[in-house]
Amino acid sequence: MMRSGNPALKQDTFSVPYSQRSTDVMTLNGTVNKCFISGMILLIAAMFVWERFFGQAEPVPPMGYIWGGSIGGFIVALVTIFKKQWSPYTVPLYAGLEGLFLGGISAMFELRFPGIVVQAVGLTMMVFIALLMAYKSGLIKATENFKLGITAATGGIALFYLLQIILGFFGVTVPYIHESGAIGIGFSLFVVVIAALNLVMDFDFIEAGAESGAPKYMEWFGAFGLLVTLIWLYLEILRLLSKLQSRD
């Protein structure tokens, strides 16, 4: 049974009726290439916001980009999930919108912790490349127990974050988690590890889709799933680094 902690990649994501199968099918390498293209679009959009904030005499406040990118990205993500055949068009749009969001968030972190963004981007890319190589070499295998554990941990983190949002409406905050103490750093490190291991599940799920004969456009949808995980991983690494630098 295929299982993934990524909400974009579910058990029936790549199931295709036999009559619709083609010799021109998705591949893991093709999906990674589409993810690279999407990542470049995201980077260009993020650099646009970065330049508007740091490269002008009168910095443009990033909150408009943050809200516009996050809301727009969420809407496009839903469209992509329910209309997978549109993914060659919606995924680049999603990447651009998320770039606006990440550009604004990154600018705010950089303003407080100079140099943190370069570190976070570098670590995210290194984790991605290392896990991809480990997966393709067979060093890491997505067994059923592995998938069950990561899915459960991912779901627990999601529920915890949701609880935080709900409590926030009542002015209640969870102590220690967002602080730079041992508990806060330990929690962030745990979340970073879980986010990273979700990449292994995504690789396995995409490879299973390729083996099932999913059409070529599903490479874009697979890239969307990878992008969702990478964005989560980057944000968690950014949060972890900010806590570590707050201790200095």
Image (cartoon, rainbow, N blue to C red):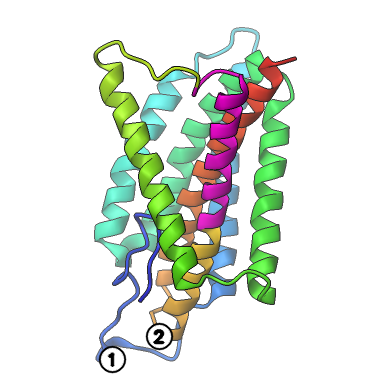
Q: Earlier in the sequence, mark 1 or mark 2?
A: 1
Q: Quadrant of the N terminus?
A: bottom left
Residue occupying image coordinates x 30% and y 10%: 171
Residue to which mark 1 is pinned: 18
Distance in Å between CA atoms under marks 1 and 2: 9 Å
Residue 53: percent from left, percent from top: 59, 18
The label shown at residue 213 is: 2
Using residue 24 as the reference point, say whether residue 12 is left or right of it: left
Residue drawn at point x = 36 percent, y = 57 percent: 8
Magenta: main secondary structure? helix
Q: Residue at x 49, y 65 (%)?
A: 146
State whether residue 209 appears in this view.
yes
**Residue 190 got which mark?**
none
In the rendered image, the vertical position of residue 179 relative to residue 229, given as above or below? above
In the image, is 22 to the left or to the right of 166?
A: right
Residue 134 occupies quadrant: bottom right
Q: Secondary structure at mark 2?
A: loop
User: Could you say whether the residue bearing mark 1 is in a helix, strand or loop?
Assistant: helix
Q: Quadrant of the C terminus?
A: top right
Judged left or right of residue 202, residue 89 is left
x, y percentage for residue 25? 45, 83
Extent of the magenta region = 177-198
Residue drawn where x is 60% and y is 49% of the image: 40
Q: Amino acid at mark 1?
A: Tyr
In the displayed orientation, state which residue is furthest to the top: 58
